[in-house]
Image (tube, rainbow, N blue to C red):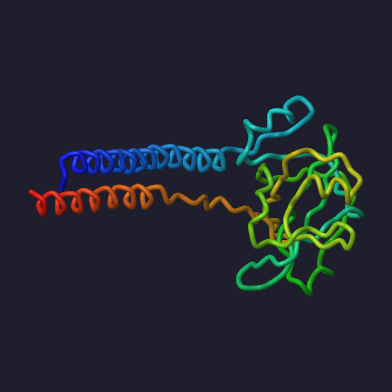
């Protein structure tokens, strides 16, 4: 092999190797950050419920994944069913009900109800205190159908869509209500904190590719040595 071609070849592979190694290191840094983030969530969930009122409701970013208690009343005339939910292999809905407070109206995920048991839902407009986990609605998954506001068909929580449907000015976060053992349905505490953490596998992949590249370059070097 011509000397210039050899130099070009090895420079190209050196750059590729550095890129693969840097991607592996970046994934390890992401792993460290993700582990810290998940641990913070676990700590927040274990803290006592904080009362949300007109003095602190705007500091939501400090309370995400934190249990909170809120005083107000449900607006059942504006309730929404999120379809295609599964609990213990049973298909049903998530009951979403706006909850009016002194500082605004927040969407509350009351929990899971089997598809044919919505008649078990007890509707009350009394002022009460509810406890749940504060969160921001997750983005629509790729294969999730789009909400149909006109026909009242819902597949995920979208605050903008639900503002249009309910004609309410809603807060930009939701409360996932804790399970109430007194009620048969809904089954509360329908929050998902299983945050994907695959960065170690990604790092292993990048470092493995770097090793394969080194072996390949070594073989070529031996061939033309």
Question: Which of the 4 image quadrants contains residue 179?
Answer: bottom right
Q: Is residue 218 above or below residue 184?
A: above
Q: Is residue 192 left or right of residue 131?
A: left
Left or right of residue 197, residue 55 in this image: right
Residue at (16% x, 52% y) in the render: 220
Of 149 and 212, nearer the camera is 212
As drawn, the residue found furthest toward the left would be 225
Point out residue 30 in the picture as x, y percentages from the top left corner.
Answer: 42, 40
User: Quadrant location of residue 24?
Assistant: top left
Q: Is residue 88 left or right of residue 111?
A: left
Residue drawn at the location 24% of the way across and 50% of the way down: 213
Q: Give the x, y percent position of residue 26.
A: 38, 38
Q: In the picture provided, is 30 more to the left or to the right than 117?
A: left
Image location (x, y in percent) of residue 17: 28, 42
Q: Is residue 38 above or below residue 109?
A: above
Q: Is residue 84 visible?
A: yes
Give percent across and percent down for residue 133: 65, 45
Q: What residue is rendered at 86% in x and 61% in y?
A: 152
Instruction: Look at the picture and state if 117 lies above or below 146.
Output: below
- Residue 132 or 61: which is nearer the viewer? 61
User: Most extreme residue toward the top, as rendered?
Assistant: 55
The answer to whether residue 185 is seen in the rendering is no
């Amino acid at each position: 092999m011509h000397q210039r071609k050899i130099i070009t070849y090895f420079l190209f592979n050196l750059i590729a190797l550095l890129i693969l190694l840097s991607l592996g290191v970046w994934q390890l840094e992401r792993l460290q950050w993700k582990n810290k983030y998940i641990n913070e969530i676990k700590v927040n969930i274990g803290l006592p419920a904080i009362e949300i009122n007109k003095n602190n409701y705007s500091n939501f970013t400090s309370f995400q994944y934190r249990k909170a208690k809120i005083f107000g009343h449900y607006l059942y005339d504006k309730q929404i069913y999120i379809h295609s939910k599964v609990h213990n292999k049973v298909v049903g809905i998530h009951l979403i009900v706006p909850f009016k407070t002194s500082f605004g109206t927040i969407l509350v995920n009351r929990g899971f109800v089997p598809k044919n048991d919505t008649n078990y839902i007890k509707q009350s407009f009394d002022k009460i205190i509810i406890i749940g986990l504060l969160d921001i609605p997750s983005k629509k998954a790729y294969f999730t159908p789009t909400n149909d506001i006109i026909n009242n068909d819902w597949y995920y929580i979208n605050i903008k869509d639900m503002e249009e449907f309910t004609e309410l000015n809603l807060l930009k976060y939701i409360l996932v209500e804790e399970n109430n053992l007194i009620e048969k349905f809904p089954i509360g505490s329908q929050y998902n904190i299983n945050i994907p953490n695959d960065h170690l596998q990604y790092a292993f992949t990048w470092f493995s590719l770097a090793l394969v590249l080194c072996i390949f370059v070594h073989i070529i070097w031996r061939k033309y040595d």
